[in-house]
Amino acid sequence: MAPKAREKAKPAAAPAVAIEDLFTSLNRHIQRSEYDLAVKVSDQVLSIAPGDEDAIRCKLVALIKNDSIDDALSSIQVFSKKTSMDFSFFKAYCLYRQNKLDEALESLKGQEGNSAIMLLESQILFRLGKMDACVDIYQKLQKSKIDSLEINFAAGLVSAGRASEVQGTMDTLRVKPTSSFELAYNVACSLIERNKYKDAEQMLLSARRIGQETLMEENLADDDIEIELAPLAVQLAYVQQVLGNSQEAFESYSSIIKKNLADESSLAVAISNLIAIKGPKDVSDGLRKLDKLIEKGEGPLTFHLARGLDLKLSEKQREAIYVNRMLLLLHSNKLDQARELASALPSMFPNSIMPVLLQAAVHVRENKANKAEEILGQFTSKFPDKSKIILLARAQIAAAAGHPQIAAESLLKIQDIQHKPATVATIVSLKERAGDIDGADAVFDSAIKWWSNAMAEDNKLDVIMQEAASFKLRHGKKDEAAHLYEELVKSHGSIEALVGLIQTAAHTDIQKAESYEKQLKPFPGLKGIDVESLEKTSGAKNTENAPAAGIPEAYEPKNKEKTKKKRKRKPKYPKGFDPANPGPPPDPERWLPKRERSSYRPKRKDKRAAQIRGSQGAVVKEAASNVSSKSNQTANSKGTSQTSTEQTKPSSKSRKKSRN
């Protein structure tokens, strides 16, 4: 009987791994930033305990830390169906990382106001540009002990346009600006916003020194330290640029760009500022650099910045990059591209006045001044609070295009400067050019009324009244001019006003003119002049040596030098020349070369010398003898012994004939 086959031994079951050991390894992977391994261990824990909330949180955090935002959102969607956990915070953070800011803010609604949620909300508001709401959250978090709160607080105040509150906030938080290089950098930004550039420069230098010391203690490489401090270097170069040290700023920007050891946002700002320093120089290089930063979208009028710069740069910085590219396009006369970019900018920056100015610039370059004036006028009617610069631009365009009335109306709408002497003079000149004399007169009257009621230390009423009186007198309004001059004499007592009053009153009221004439100081040396005899003369005559009419002889200089008369000498003629019978006149072309005279006729060439008969290469004996004799004559005349050694070679045809 055959023996039974032995059965194969079954493998022993793997021993179950304790959850505690898995969490220990999970913690170790997270501490070492080994997020891929942390995700795998979390899955092992969830395979044993599917509903473990700590494992779920660890997996989501590991995915987010590993920049796997899409996987994190997918896991949130799966876990939300299996468990009752609240994933609103994780979902909001993932949406924030994907720049879906409105959805992220919506996900945080209804959550308890703990510090983590408030910080995330403040970051979302900061990214959305709602700076005041962001600062309000930071103010509520002042009492909570959050690391680096003062850094974000200072950044929020600067971005909200409240840079003057930064120092007070630092005093309230009892924090020194130099406690960290990040805080020193933000404080320097607040000083720049307040136009304290020297103080900002010193603060930036301190921030760079503190940053180098701090990062060296963390054992970072030199290149990594330079990358971390790149924003400081760019901001310091900008301060030097504003202070007028353009060469130092140029070298700093060029070094940053050449080394390429900076984050994307700092590099983009350095490129834009370098182009601003160059101006219209090297336009092609500037366009080439900006084209790497700006990309055109799928739509006809859509542009965006490359490498995620739209999320890293502020709105002001993004606008500067687009504006620089627009100006370079105008300088290079690429009007089609400039027109396309100018049409897209209003939707990209709806709260800025720069897009409408650039649109007007494009129309001016295309010689469409009327269209530019129309666009600027429409903007001023829609946004009157932002129209000061727009009205100035419209006035300049209209004045250059020969539309003085439109330019004057634009300047009259600017309430802040319409009564300044320079503005009044410009408006009056434009009105005069347009033929609106009454309008110009009304401008003077309005300015006089405004300065009469103004409580300013530097009052310009006398200047305005003086010019107004001169204008009225020039245009025939003598009574009004006399009234203004009289007020000036009573209030200021200036000699110019007194002279103007006498001249004006002489046309209307002679007695008043004579009464004010007595106030003039006598001019020395005029007592001996007989005015009546002066009036009887017919006027000034061009007599250089004659004495003035009515002046006695005592005023004439006694020792006068008599003018010497020039002697007239007889001309000298050549020998044998009779001036009574000069003969035929000389040839007027006698000084010209013979070739340029009208009577010149070139010599004809001897046609018979060219009539040579015979085979190719044959030479007539007589012609050869003539040539040799001529060459010998020229050689002897020059005194040289040079002779020609060239010989004419007979052709192959002549050789064959000679053999025959």
Image (cartoon, rainbow, N blue to C red):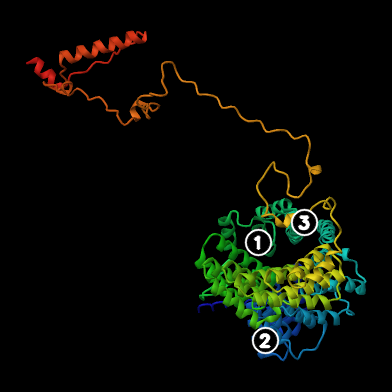
Q: Secondary structure at mark 1?
A: helix
Q: Looking at numbered disc 3 in the image, what kind of residue is underneath it?
A: Val
Quadrant in the picture for the C terminus? top left
Sequence-first disc among 1 and 3: 1
Q: Do callouts 2 and 1 mark residues in contact (Cβ within 8 Å)? A: no
Q: Which residue is mark 2?
A: 79
Question: Which label sits on residue 612?
Answer: none
Q: Residue 39: x percent and y percent?
A: 69, 75
Relative to 209, 242 lies left or right: left
- Few, some or many C-alpha atoms within 10 Å of disc 2 (few <14, some 14-19, many ≥20)? some
Identity of the residue drawn at 73% across and 49% down: 549
Sequence-first disc among 2 and 1: 2
Query: Looking at the image, can residue 648 be seen?
Result: yes
Q: Secondary structure at mark 3?
A: helix
Q: Nearer the viewer, mark 2 or mark 1?
A: 1
Q: Which residue is mark 3?
A: 531
Q: Nearer the viewer, mark 2 or mark 3?
A: 3
Quadrant for residue 401, please give it. Answer: bottom right
Q: Secondary structure at mark 2?
A: helix
Residues under labels 2 and 1: Cα distance? 46 Å
Q: Which residue is mark 1?
A: 272
